């Protein structure tokens, strides 16, 4: 077995910049770039996006089984707020637990708080914007003042 002498910085770079969707797509870890490449028909981007979506589906299914069902699925953060295709592709196979989205509403929802499930859906599906920079600032302020972040 070949021995490597990676520094902590090397390992951090490999994990954060060269693994996951960046490693699979060979494009980027930025989902906007992967989505653009997917739309352009780049196979590695399509694979990375499919793997990403499958992982979300797997975890929702696992948690649904563990909890005996699901009341709500929330899409948030950059991908959840803006990746229309990801939301649709994640929700489509979850019909067996009662997930049904309004495709027209999903297609026009970007970065606004919106219920995208249909009235008939047994599971509410919601897009909720987040201010990640504000949360980081609040957590940093709490830590600097000796408090636990919320």
Image (cartoon, rainbow, N blue to C red):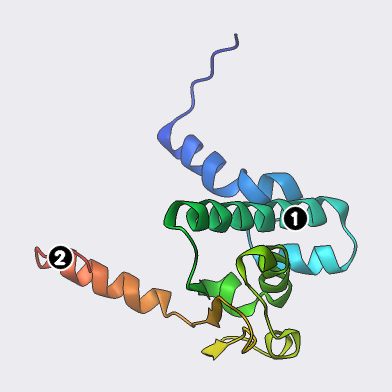
Residue 107 in sight in this render: yes
User: Could you say which quadrant of the image residue 125 lies in?
Assistant: bottom right
Give the residue at the far top of this rendering: 1
Q: How dense is the environment of label 2, judged by Cα within 10 Å: few (below 14), some, or many (20 and up)?
A: few
What residue appears at the point 55 percent right and 75 percent down from the top-left corner? 123
- Dot 2: what SS? helix
Residue 27 in sight in this render: no
Q: Which one is earlier in the sequence, the residue at label 1 or at label 2? A: 1
- Dot 1: what SS? helix
What residue appears at the point 47 percent right and 73 percent down from the top-left corner? 71
Identify which residue, 6 or 61, lies in the foreground. Answer: 61
Image spot of residue 4 (x, y percent): 53, 19
User: Could you say which quadrant of the image residue 18 lies in?
Assistant: top right
Q: Residue 50: which numbered mark, if any?
A: 1
Relative side of 63 to 92, left or right: left
Identify which residue, 16 or 63, lies in the foreground. Answer: 63
Give the residue at the far left of this rendering: 146
Image spot of residue 19 (x, y percent): 61, 43
Relative side of 106 to 6, left or right: right
Give the CA distance from mark 1 to mark 2.
Answer: 40 Å
> Label 2: which residue?
144
Q: How dense is the environment of label 1, judged by Cα within 10 Å: few (below 14), some, or many (20 and up)?
A: some
Q: Is residue 12 above or below residue 82?
A: above
């Amino acid at each position: 077995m070949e021995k490597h002498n990676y520094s902590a910085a090397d390992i951090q770079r490999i994990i954060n910049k060269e693994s996951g969707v960046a490693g699979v797509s060979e494009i980027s870890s930025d989902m906007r770039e992967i989505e653009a490449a997917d739309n352009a028909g780049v196979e590695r981007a399509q694979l990375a996006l499919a793997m990403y979506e499958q992982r979300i589906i797997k975890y929702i299914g696992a948690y649904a089984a563990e909890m005996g069902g699901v009341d709500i699925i929330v899409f948030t953060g950059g991908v959840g707020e803006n990746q229309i295709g990801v939301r649709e592709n994640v929700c489509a196979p979850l019909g067996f637990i009662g997930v049904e989205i309004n495709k027209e509403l999903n297609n026009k929802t970007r970065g606004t708080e919106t219920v995208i499930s249909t009235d008939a859906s047994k599971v509410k599906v919601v897009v909720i914007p987040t201010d990640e920079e504000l949360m980081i600032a609040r957590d940093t302020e709490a830590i600097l003042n000796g408090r636990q972040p919320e």
